[in-house]
Image (cartoon, rainbow, N blue to C red):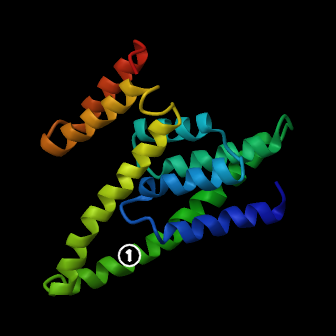
Amino acid sequence: MTTADWLHLFLYYLLLSLMSVGGAIATAPDMHRFLVSEHGWLTDLQFNNSIAIAQSAPGPNVLFVGLFGWNVGMNAAGSAPHGWLMGALGLVVCMVGVLLPSSTVTWLTIRWAQRHRERRAVRAFRLGLAPLVVGLICSTGWVLAGSSGGIMQAWPLWSLSAVTALIVWRTRIHLLWLLAAGAALGAIGLV
């Protein structure tokens, strides 16, 4: 990767950060388009594994962006001995890019919204965001499941995704139980 590529990656995350309504995971489909489809800096497997590792680890779910950067750097270094330095560079570029604008805007917006929370426009804006966030999260699931094949090829995975979404929507079962069930089904080869 050239210096211009790194700058392009940083600017991409700066801009994407401002559209990450619902969290960074809601912008995963566009990250897939940018990192895998357009530039080929990550493989589908690296993309999905980064999200799976970050989602199963404790802590903020935005860590998958850091793993994307790490993998981009490691791929750029190839077999060079300084690969971990390139991985660290990718991690920093992606995490600073994705966190700086959204954190700043969120901090300023929350302070303003708390002062004006009784205004009708503020309440309407909050209610209006909910369907947008649900749609973005569904598109993330679509991209992640799609890399394993179409609906006909990977129907167990698609079925599990649909059932999990329904359980999350209609029950109060903790997400860790659903993650454990999905991991168990994957371990025995059903999905």
Q: Residue at x 47, y 33 (%)?
A: 150
Front residue of this view, candidates 26 and 159:
159
**Residue 42: image x %, image y %?**
67, 43
User: Can you name the residue that lies furthest to the right here?
Assistant: 80
Q: Is 43 above or below relative to 8?
A: above
Mark 1 lies on residue: 107
Tell me: 125 left or right of 190.
left
Q: Is 133 above or below relative to 43?
A: below
Tell me: 110 left or right of 101.
left
Q: Residue at x 84, y 59 (%)?
A: 2
**Residue 155: image x %, image y %?**
38, 27
Q: Is 130 above or below relative to 36?
A: below
User: Can you name the residue that lies furthest to the front here?
Assistant: 152
Q: Would you call the spot at circle 1 few (<14 residues within 10 Å), some (14-19), or many (20 or more)? A: few
Tell me: 156 left or right of 35.
left
Tell me: 38 left or right of 187.
right
User: Can you name the residue that lies furthest to the top here?
Assistant: 188
Front residue of this view, candidates 95 and 123:
123
Which quarter of the picture shows residue 169? Answer: top left
Q: Residue at x 37, y 32 (%)?
A: 158
In the rendered picture of this protein, how many numbered marks are placed on residues? 1
In the picture, the quarter occupied by the N terminus is bottom right
Q: Is 3 above or below relative to 85?
A: below
Front residue of this view, candidates 3 and 162:
162
- Dot 1: what SS? helix
**Residue 56: image x %, image y %?**
41, 35
**Residue 9: image x %, image y %?**
68, 61
Q: Residue at x 26, y 62 (%)?
A: 131
Which quarter of the picture shows residue 132? Answer: bottom left
In the picture, the quarter occupied by the C terminus is top left
The three-letter amino acid code for the residue at tag 1 is Trp
